[in-house]
Amino acid sequence: MNPTLYMPIPATIERIEDETPDIKTFTIRPVEPIAFAAGQFVELAVPGIGEAPFTPSSSPKISENMEITIMRTGRVTDWLHTMKEGDEVGVRGPMGRAYPIADFHDREILIVGGGCGVGPLRSLLLALVEDLDAYARIIVRYGARTPDSIVFKDAQMHGWDQGGALDVMLTVDEASSDWDGHVGMITEILSEDYLDCHADDGVAVMCGPPVMMKFGTEKLLERGYQPENIYLSLERNMSCGIGQCGHCRLGRYYVCKDGPVFSYDEILSNPRLWDD
Amino acid sequence: MKWTICVSSELDEVLAFLGNGREVHALERLDNGTYRSSKATAWQPGHHTLGYFRQTEPLKALFFPAREFVGRWNDQSAREPMPERIVFGVKNCDLSSLSIFDHVFLDGVCPDPYYAEAREKTILVSTDCSAQLDVCFCPAVGEQPWAKVGYDINIATTPDGPVFEIGSERGEELLRSAGQYFEPAGPELLETLEKQRARRYEELVEQCHRHGLMTDTDLTAAVESSFESELWKDFAEDCVECGACNFICCTCHCFLLADGLDEAGQPARSKLWDACLFSGFAATAGGGNPRPLRAERLRNRFDKKFIYFPQVLGRYACDGCGRCTEACIANIDIRDVLRRAVDESDALHAHSSDHRAN
């Protein structure tokens, strides 16, 4: 019998950090290490309550513990937000297809994130920055609703541009009085005025709310990115995580096992692609 | 080796012998003329029967129970092993459905050991249909009223006695152990059987025709080209999204991993049948739902059966058992839905060839 097929392995919440009023980053330590690749997801369970899919936001080089950035938005996440350091959760995974990082070597990588979707992208970025010389250039474009809702604002994302190795730009839909950055939609900072890129052979990786991914993809295509070079992390109701339970089907794929990372050319023919 | 043999003794005695030492599942005829699956420690003459047509509940329940306990928190102890079982009276629609479950639970990224054990420990004794229900339409989806593949032993009753057919190595082993009951079937008997099957098939084809369905229609193309049709909205007007079509379906495999507390108050998890007609089936956290409309969910059911499974497994996920038609309290007949998809796709094609001609 394989007890981890449908049952999680126990894990302890080591640390809880507030990111925004409704987003927290949980550091969890499973009883045995879970090695994952950036873009893969896990099912995080609250004993007796339920479980939900999340993509770790920490470096895939670390398997002893993982950080998961969670917005309070439903039954399981509401419960998680009431939990304390030291509490027990469960984890199953890793599941699904990761970002094909090996194919990114020597290429320019544009990372586009929106809202809480920046979780998997942070994990990818942490994997990439460990080996910066392997890539031609790394560009980050991130949009949030308000300055308050920017995730990882203190250290992890903002400030990376200081060294010049990364080209990072943030935008917010609505500014506050202390915001000195850009104000506008994510598509704006993907335009010629704000983004100098090698679209013809560059790679773009995007994760965020469906509406942002829809317009973001359109913008990237307009800029000349090839459909096969645009990678999207899709969200569906991934439940079993192993292609059995049927909840996350998208056309001929199950997002849990064939995704969650898809190149745009694999899924562009699906008429339901952008429905959330 | 595949051989055909004829029983030379009382059928009940042979079936009791085959079921010896196994948990027996056979059909029980109810007063309303339908069959249900009935579990016992042995074949029970008079109570058990092989049945003229399929049982009401799908065979899948024996391998993929409606509610299956899968584990307790922090408890990795194995479940009680399952007993050796034999199932008598399986009809081809149900038998054929198992290739869907094998694909889902055995061939995927992470095979399900409980399902594997259930398959491993269950001997399937199929029987030819010798009558049909009004809702049956298996020829329209490429199936037939007798076992094609996947059986261990098949029994066909003929006026000259029951004919046993071997479908697997373990079926052969089991029949060899009962060798005293059998003698080779002669060519005349096999010819009788062939004619009998052809007659039964023709009757089913006629029933399909009465409902406007042919046997060689490309249902994938029909459902695909009617994606934008009003037909889904029209049928969804009557649908009350009770999920009965999903639950009763011999191929629907979707499930929910449900967390809760067991009798002792310990966190535990079960696998429950789920239904894609339910509004929350595909809903994501934060209020997103790829299929908010009932019409979209109804269409999804046909998309899964007639587009997805042909793509990934080369077959429809429908065996024409007609259970969904029987179970639907809104009287939605799957044959009407398919016929309308076919008609609309024919009309579409006629229209587009008109355009080409011009």
Image (spheres, coloured by chain):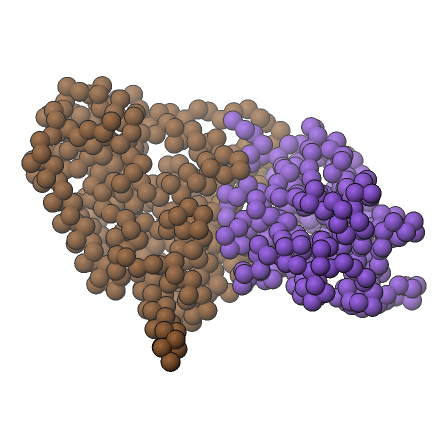
Q: Which chain is purple?
A: A
Task: Give the camera-side residue of B93 and A127.
Answer: A127
Residue B140 x %, y %: 28, 55
Foreground pick, B305 / B42: B305
Say which chain is brown.
Answer: B
Q: Is B121 on the left or on the right of B165, as rendered?
A: right
Residue B57 can be seen, yes or no: yes
Vertical placement of residue A8 versus A136, above or below? above
Q: Is B185 drawn above or below residue A267 in the view shown? A: above
x 72%, y 65%: residue: A223
Give the answer, above or below, for where B132 lies relative to A102.
Answer: below
Position of residue A207 measured from the top left corner of the image (x, y, whole percent): 70, 54
Q: Horizontally, is A145 left or right of B189 in the view? A: right
The reply to whether residue B283 is in sight is no
Relative placement, left or right, of A198 versus B15 is right
Where does the N terminus of chain B fall, quadrant-wise? top left
Q: Position of residue B56 (x, y in %)?
A: 29, 46
Q: Residue furthest bottom?
A: B358
Q: Is residue B104 left or right of residue A71?
A: left
Q: Residue at x 15, y 48 (%)?
A: B198
